Amino acid sequence: MIFVIIAVYNRIEATLECLESLEKQTYRDFNITIIDDGSTDGSATMIRKRYPTIHILKGDGNLWWTGAMHWGVENVLQRTQKGDFILSLNNDVTFTPNYLEQLKKTSEKYGRAVTGSLCRDEAAPENILDRGVKIDWKHYSYSQTPFLKNQDDTTDIDTVSGRGVLIPIEVFQKIGNYRKKWLPHYGADYEFGFRAKKYGFPLALSYKAIVYLKDNLTGFRPKGNILSFAQAWKKLTHRKSPSNIFVQSTLVILHCPGKLQKLDTLYYVVTANIYIFLRTIVFYTLQKLHILKNVA
């Protein structure tokens, strides 16, 4: 069985679209647990009305993504049996009816691998947003694995995104749950993938299991090359920012190989982020003083 876990906070329209995709699946041996972390748009009520069999856990608004997923995993593991899977899924994606079938097929192909999804932009499906992640620890630089059109999947990855990843339950049983204290929102999915690989579990990404992402709903991503002080600080420190310096530093501390390399990369991450922050403030100030023209 596949136990689907979805953390939600408002965005009921997106959640219902995601659930409609699940309702249409060809693979039927699954159930759904939703962690509603204090939604104010009536999410829990509407979900219960349309899908009375869905298990809903209600938070107080302070769980964030990792706390919600951690709770969901704890709850689900009490009901699992040998051979089951957990699917970490975001509510801002949709997918085709063979999605679960393809994920499970790829996982079993590689000996019950932790298996991620190919991610395309829902608004422009020809655009691939995530085809598998590699990391260069020396420069703390993430890159995308080349997309091989003649293949069904790839194992040339270092971690996976939590927006659609199938995880055999024995992975949680061996390496533990998501790290909610270290990484309360961003980065916990990547950290889990790094940890699983470190423990010897295979990682894969299925090109046939595709999620279509509503990219405009994802995270704090201010537009423009010049940000105000408040925007730049929020980008550097906010929990919902993928550029959060604390997330980057935590991932380096936990998973960068070698003590000297760890220190070198940590120094690089901190100084590079401070430089970018200060440069942004200088450019913003020059723009406000009309010394520098507006930059889109």
Image (cartoon, rainbow, N blue to C red):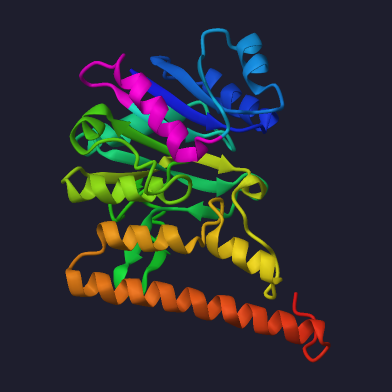
Q: Nearer the viewer, residue 172 or 151?
A: 172
Question: Which residue corresponds to the image point at 39% horizontal and 53% vertical from the top-left?
Answer: 132
Q: Position of residue 26 (x, y in %)?
A: 46, 19
Task: State the residue in front, 94 or 265.
Answer: 265
In the picture as drawn, the residue positioned furthest to the bottom comes out as: 291
Q: Where's residue 61, x and y in %? A: 58, 33
Q: How many marks?
A: 0
Q: Is residue 277 left or right of residue 30?
A: right
**Residue 102 appears in the rendering:** no
- Please tell me which residue is depicted at 83% across the width and 88% down the height of the picture: 290
Residue 156 lies, with reference to residue 178, above or below; the image says: below
Q: Residue furthest right?
A: 290
Q: Is residue 273 magenta?
A: no
Quadrant in the picture for the N terminus:
top left
Residue 260 to residue 186: above or below:
below
Q: Is residue 230 left or right of residue 251?
A: right
Residue 30: x and y, percent? 41, 17
Q: Is residue 31 left or right of residue 280?
A: left
Segment colored magenta: 62-85
Residue 159 visible in the shown view: yes
Measured as percent of width and height from the top left, residue 249 is found at: 37, 63
Seen in the picture, residue 143 relative to 61 is either above or below; the reply is: below
Q: Quadrant of the C terminus?
A: bottom right
Q: Is residue 262 left or right of residue 57?
A: left
Is residue 77 a member of the stretch shown in magenta?
yes
Name the image quarter holding residue 157. bottom left
> Quadrant of residue 80 in the image?
top left
Name which residue lies at 69% across and 83% down.
283
- Please give the name of the residue rendered at 69% of the width and 65% of the height, measured from the top-left corner: 223
